[in-house]
Image (cartoon, grey):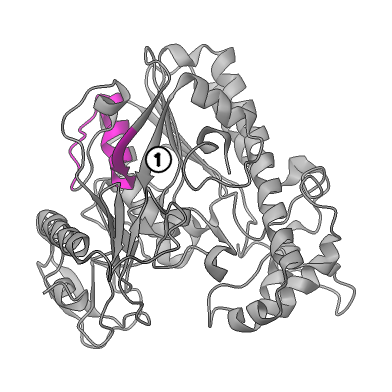
Amino acid sequence: MIGPYANTPGARDTVLTPNMDRLMERGVVFDNHFIGSAPCMPARRELMTGRKEFLWRGWGPMEPFDEHIASRASAAGAVTAMVTDHYHYWEYPAHGYLERFDGVTMIRGHEMDILNTDKLPGEGLPGWVEQIERWRPGLGARYYRNVKQFGGEEDFFAPKTFSAACDWLDGNHGHPKFLLWTECFDVHEPFHVPEPYRSMFTDKDPDKYNCWPPYQEGFHGHTAEWWAQADSDQIDFVRSQYKGKLAMADAHLGKLLDRMDKYDLWENTVLILTTDHGHELGEKERFGKQSPHYDLSANIPLIVCAPGVKPARVSALTTAVDIYPTVLEVLDADSAAPHGRSLLPLVRGESGGEREAVVYGTFGCGATLTDGNYTYHTGWDADRELNQYTAFMLDPAPGAVGGRFIPGVGCPVWKIPRASAAPVGEMLFDRTADPGQAVNILSERPDIRERMRALLVREMEREGVPDEQYDRLNLR
């Protein structure tokens, strides 16, 4: 939905994003950049450590054996800072990500942040909050406690986040070397936006529609029931509010780019724009970012602006763990990564060392591999062994054993039995002929299936994934 990708296969409903277009006009746009591990915190661990996650563990904290990007940047003489409204960082299961930065600015209150405990009136909640409460009991009220005093656009999360980043640059742009990690949770549910964005793409009454549809069964949501009653007007409304949030985030990104202009930072600074994952908006009758991951949520934006580099497009395959060594190489820091490769050769237009394929997914589900032309989703056997490997036992874990289970990691970790998600069958898609990935050609192309399975096994062996995953994913 953003301008730099408006003409790529599968693009739809393009939103005006003039500030992302500014980056396209001076930077290198990657057309085949993919997630590694989804969703939020697994993706962030990959970005901050260069270590793949989803075949070893799920959502959790930074591991003690991880080499944090801020630590390595600091060792190379950089001043490091994080500006974010991503409240998962200060949740119990996700500690260790913020603490290594020299400075952190936290914008509170998004989604389910435990910020405000004010008692709300027993009746008379705004209509849009009641719509959320119907399908996510308790969460609409929690969010409303955090935002009920909001007035104009400047009170919302993307504006606050980019404003804080601008303030940081005002005081810190003169450092000889710095890493500013500006992380905006938006575009994210609930898709609650102020005017003029609320009505920018719709004329529907927001009090009559749900801006936060459920998509996680058993997690304060009633997904099946919601889909049974959702009509095209409801789905169109969600998309309109998503677009509104995107337009608002882009507008305030522009203020950060203006600071880059003001301080002539383009001459000595690399700017990278990317995200953790996409978000389905009713396509394939799903919302969110579940497995199996179609290109809708897996093929994500990446734009790199670097001094002396002309605008270009790159078709080579890249993935989330590649951000880590790229940033550290820019800072003349130790850029060795367990699984990542620096993007700078591709940014400079050099060839050699491109990935043959990338692998991605969600812990407890299947694995997905693309070679750029085809995408293969494994099935999985929920009755086969699945373990999580981590140094942290966050909850009681019967059957857990300790040992040195992760290749290249010198300290012992827990091996914790886990249950798989409900299985989904194998799928194979032709990305060129079928960019919407609507037609499963698995039975028609057994030759491609076997080639992709062999390539997946080779990639898994290269990454050193746990042995039981081959059985679980029906790869042997």
Q: Amino acid at mark 1?
A: Phe
Which corner quadrant holds the C terminus?
Answer: bottom left
Which corner quadrant of the image does residue 303 belong to?
Answer: top left
Query: Considering depth in this image, is 207 or 8 the residue closer to the camera?
Result: 8
At horizontal 37% and vertical 12% (from top left) the residue drawn is 308
Query: Considering depth in this image, is 306 or 113 the residue closer to the camera?
Result: 306
Query: Considering depth in this image, is 71 or 124 the residue closer to the camera?
Result: 124
Q: Is residue 157 visible?
A: no
* Mark 1 lies on residue: 101
Residue 236 x %, y %: 71, 60
Is residue 245 left or right of 7 when viewed as pictured?
right
- Check if residue 358 falls in the magenta segment: no
Q: Is residue 111 visible?
A: yes
Is residue 455 left or right of 85 when viewed as pictured?
left
At horizontal 28% and vertical 28% (from top left) the residue drawn is 346
Residues in magenta, as a range: 315-338
Residue 23 x %, y %: 51, 25
Which corner quadrant holds the N terminus?
Answer: top right
Is residue 308 left or right of 411 when viewed as pictured?
right
Query: Farthest residue in the front direction?
Result: 444
| Mark 1, secondary structure of its residue | loop
- Check if residue 321 falls in the magenta segment: yes
Residue 321 x %, y %: 29, 46
